[in-house]
């Protein structure tokens, strides 16, 4: 293999890495499974934190492919970046997030 070539990971592997890195619980004591993921998050879901009080929401991974949710993730990256241990933080009011996610379901 030549130097300088990047190895492309499958999209699911990349998403798993992102979720494992950023699904922190801000010091809250949650049980974790053997993969380091919170036990209270069902398979196929991940946690995000929303609003000033950083309310924790569990959302389906399928939301990652929805353009509406991708806009929220872009806003999160612009405001907070993804290079921290705070979990994925969505910069909008809880009522706006709840309205959007209920429309996506």
Image (tube, rainbow, N blue to C red):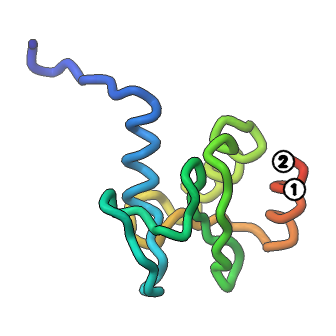
Q: Residue 54 carries which label?
A: none
**What's the residue at 67%, 79% (across, down)?**
55
Q: Do labels 2 and 1 touch, CB within 8 Å?
A: yes
Tell me: residue 89, above or below residue 76. below
Alpha carbons under labels 2 and 1: distance apart: 5 Å
Residue extending furthest top?
1
Q: Is mark 1 on a helix, strand or loop?
A: helix
**What's the residue at 24%, 23% (across, down)?**
6
Residue 22 x %, y %? 44, 61
**What's the residue at 42%, 45% (across, down)?**
16
Tell me: residue 59, above or below residue 57. above
**What's the residue at 40%, 38% (across, down)?**
14
Tell me: residue 101, above or below residue 16. below
Q: What element carries label 2?
A: loop
Residue that numbered label 1 is attached to:
102
Residue that numbered label 2 is attached to:
105
Q: How many labels does the image show?
A: 2
């Amino acid at each position: 293999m030549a130097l300088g070539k990047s190895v492309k990971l499958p999209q699911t592997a990349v998403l798993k890495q992102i979720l494992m890195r950023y699904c922190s619980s801000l010091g809250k004591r949650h049980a974790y499974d053997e993969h380091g993921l919170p036990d209270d998050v069902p398979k196929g879901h991940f946690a995000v934190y929303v609003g000033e009080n950083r309310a924790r929401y569990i959302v389906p991974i399928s939301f990652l492919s929805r353009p509406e949710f991708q806009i929220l993730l872009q806003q999160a990256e612009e405001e907070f970046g993804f290079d921290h241990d705070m979990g994925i933080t969505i910069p909008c009011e809880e009522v706006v997030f709840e309205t959007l996610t209920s429309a996506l379901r």
